[in-house]
Amino acid sequence: MNETIAAIATPLQEGAISIIRMSGDEAISIADKICTLKLTDVPANSIRYGFIVDPQSQMKVDEVLISVFRSPKTFTTEDIVEINCHGGVYITRQILKLCLANGARLATRGEFTQRAFLNGRIDLTQAEAVNDMIEADNHANAQMAMQGIRGSIRRLLDPLINDILNIIANIEVNIDYPEYDDVVQLTNDLLLPMARSWVMKIDEILKRSESGRLIKEGIQTAIVGKPNVGKSSLLNALLEEEKAIVTDIAGTTRDIVEGNIQLGNFTLHLIDTAGIRDTDDTVEKIGIERSLKAIENAQLVIVVLDGSRPLDQEDEQLLAMTEEKTRIILYNKRDLMEKTNEEHLTVCAANGEIDPLLTRLHELYDKHLIALKEPSLANERQSGLMMKARRCMETAIEAMEAGYELDLITIDIQEAYTALKEILGEVHREDLLDALFSNFCLGK
Ligand code: GDP
Ligand code: ZN
């Protein structure tokens, strides 16, 4: 007997409609008890018009539409009832209370999706994709989530998992029946190229997932430059609002000012840093240290130079410091330049004329969108396990190269296999699962 769970599935605020959702063996009979309709024999996937009634007082509570879905072809594979009521906070809570008073238990966060997973309707990556869809804030993220919901990660991993499983089975037979003629005798020479091709496949998937991560999490971007070159003006132009303080006085941007911009499918997390230069002023020093940190942590550095003046030692120092980073070198104050160099990116931050920068940003990042036409991993959990699988496979390869016996090598191959299965949730730990689903919305 499966406990029936209930929750409000829509945001708890005034709106056109709210939905209260129940899932479990008693979902239909509980709903039946609290409405004017006879729900116990309505066919699957039907929607009925009626009234919610408090069985104790016999008072009509609200006018509703009730959808009935019957096991097993439902989101959770269990019987599901969804009550569409008027979208008031009070009335929505009232109907949930009636469900709870008549036999349902309040669902925990993500419990509907967790049941869909535990009942085998979706794998763990699909469950995660459901949550990604809810959180998606641009086209690319929504598309990635859509692929994930449709099981793209399983399709990506299944061939690899099956290949490895076949080899593990083969090794077992080789170990157990060394004399058995019908089985291919696996040797390290036969195994090595296979294991190497698996590592290559894993690397390919990991590389693509990096593009996915950039889209999903945004790009940490530091704006650096000595005082007065126009960093704050640039940040303002990018943010199109007065969030950063623009001033004539050098070195006043001691605090890092931050903001996010949405650039097509990418989010830039922008940080305007204090002017980097040698100074004795302690307050400013702290700012400089933070700038250095910001450069270190940034995935992209925008180096701002004053194009109306010749570069000085400080500028050169900055350019040297950021040489290893993905960077854009920007010559600001184009309006004050006597002649512009064709090779330089020139802008006028004060007037919001920053199109060359936006074009350059698109050039830098649009290639990641192309990479995402292929399915990729969706989060840290998945890529962490993928990296674990890679490490184990590398260890197996080293053991093969050193000429170890099959029974030793197979341990590492099995560990790699388990890590891959764990991505799909086919091997899982209860406590990790609970933690994962607790990030979901209530009623999801
Ligand atoms: P920061 O210290 O690098 O953050 O520089 P600010 O953004 O505070 O700008 C310093 C000064 O340069 C301010 O007076 C701005 O108005 C001015 N400024 C910024 N960008 C431009 C520009 O494109 N052209 C001109 N003429 N002045 C600019
Ligand atoms: Zn500034």
Image: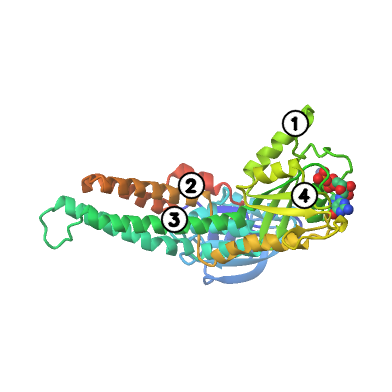
Q: Considering the numbered disc 3 on the image, is that residue within a helix, a strand or a loop?
A: helix
> Is residue 56 among what the camera can see?
no
Q: Are marks 2 and 3 in contact (CB under 8 Å)?
A: no
Disc 1 or disc 2, which is closer to the eye?
A: 1
Q: Earlier in the sequence, mark 4 or mark 3?
A: 3
Residue at the disc numbered 2: 433
Disc 4 or disc 3, which is closer to the eye?
A: 4
Going by the numbered disc 3, the residue's amino acid type is Asp
- Closest to the observer, 180 or 124: 180
> Disc 4 to disc 3, how far (Cα)?
38 Å
> Disc 4 to disc 1, how far (Cα)?
21 Å
Q: Earlier in the sequence, mark 4 or mark 1?
A: 1
Q: Is residue 9 above or below residue 227?
A: below
Going by the numbered disc 2, the residue's amino acid type is Leu
Please tell me in which quadrant of the rendered image residue 245 appears.
Answer: top right
Q: Is residue 111 left or right of residue 275?
A: left
Residue at the disc numbered 1: 285
Q: Is residue 257 left or right of residue 399?
A: right
Disc 4 crowd, CA 10 A, few/some/many (<14, 14-19, 20+): many
Residue 249 drawn at (x, y percent): 88, 40
Q: Are marks 1 and 2 in contact (CB under 8 Å)?
A: no
> Is residue 72 among what the camera can see?
yes
Q: Earlier in the sequence, mark 1 or mark 2?
A: 1
Q: Are marks 4 and 2 in contact (CB under 8 Å)?
A: no
> Disc 3 to disc 1, how far (Cα)?
42 Å
Q: Residue at x 79, y 48 (%)?
A: 231
Disc 3 or disc 1, which is closer to the eye?
A: 1
Disc number placed over residue 305 in the picture, else none = 4
Q: Earlier in the sequence, mark 4 or mark 2?
A: 4
Q: Residue at x 23, y 55 (%)?
A: 189
> Disc 4 to disc 2, how far (Cα)?
50 Å
